[in-house]
Image (spheres, grey):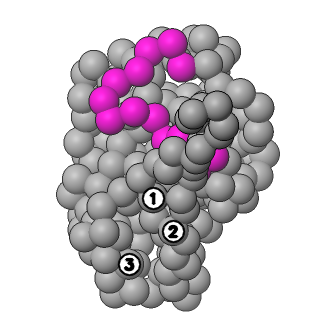
Amino acid sequence: MGRISLPASTAPGPTKPEVRALVVWTLDLRPADHVVDIGAGTGAVSIAAARSADRVTAVERDQERVEAIRTNLAANDCESSVSVIRATAPDGLPETADAVFVGGTRNLETVLDWVATAAPRIVVLNAARLETAVRAIEGFRSRAFDPEVRRVSIGRGEQLAGGTAIDPARPVYVISGHPDRGAS
């Protein structure tokens, strides 16, 4: 996947590199794909997707994050393949997509309704909160997206008393499904 430069960061921080690698792997991107990144944050997933897909639409509601995305795209030479739209999804979303990443879960129900209409090959959603994961799983099931759920826990080594201890990061739920199969 390669390293991504993120000189501009905003709270909450970008999807961690290990989780981002799993997200991009799960999206199973193809060269001609149009990827939609909803709640794009710092643009880290958009940048990773742009390395494999033809084009990416990054949708973010917060102006500070939109500016961070543009800075980070420039730092990774991705400005030409990523369109950045400032909007609160589902506003600003294109009519269709081949693959969708949902990083922001505001308006989850209406975003999932858009996903069902757009019928991408795959949708992947990250959730840090258990309640959000449950809502997403229920939303996927009610729309026949056939959810697959992964709980990802990453720990990083840190020095402790002359040795190494693992500092665990908060787990993330990575939920994926296939909207185009549910539409058939």
Q: Which mark is residue 151?
A: 2
Say whether residue 116 is visible: yes
* Image position of 159 (left or right of 136): right
Label 1 sits on residue: 172
Q: Is 52 situated left or right of 24 in this image?
A: right
Amino acid of disc 3: Ile
The residue depicted at 51 percent of the width and 85 percent of the height is: 146
**Residue 62 bears which disc, if any?**
none
To which residue does mark 3 refer?
A: 137
Q: Residues at badges 1 and 2 in contact (C-beta under 8 Å)?
A: yes
Please state the extent of the stretch shown in magenta in the rendering: 6-20
Which structural element holds mark 3?
A: helix
Q: Residue at x 58, y 66 (%)?
A: 122
Q: Main secondary structure of the magenta part?
A: loop
Q: Earlier in the sequence, mark 2 or mark 3?
A: 3
Say which of marks 3 and 1 sits in front. Answer: 1
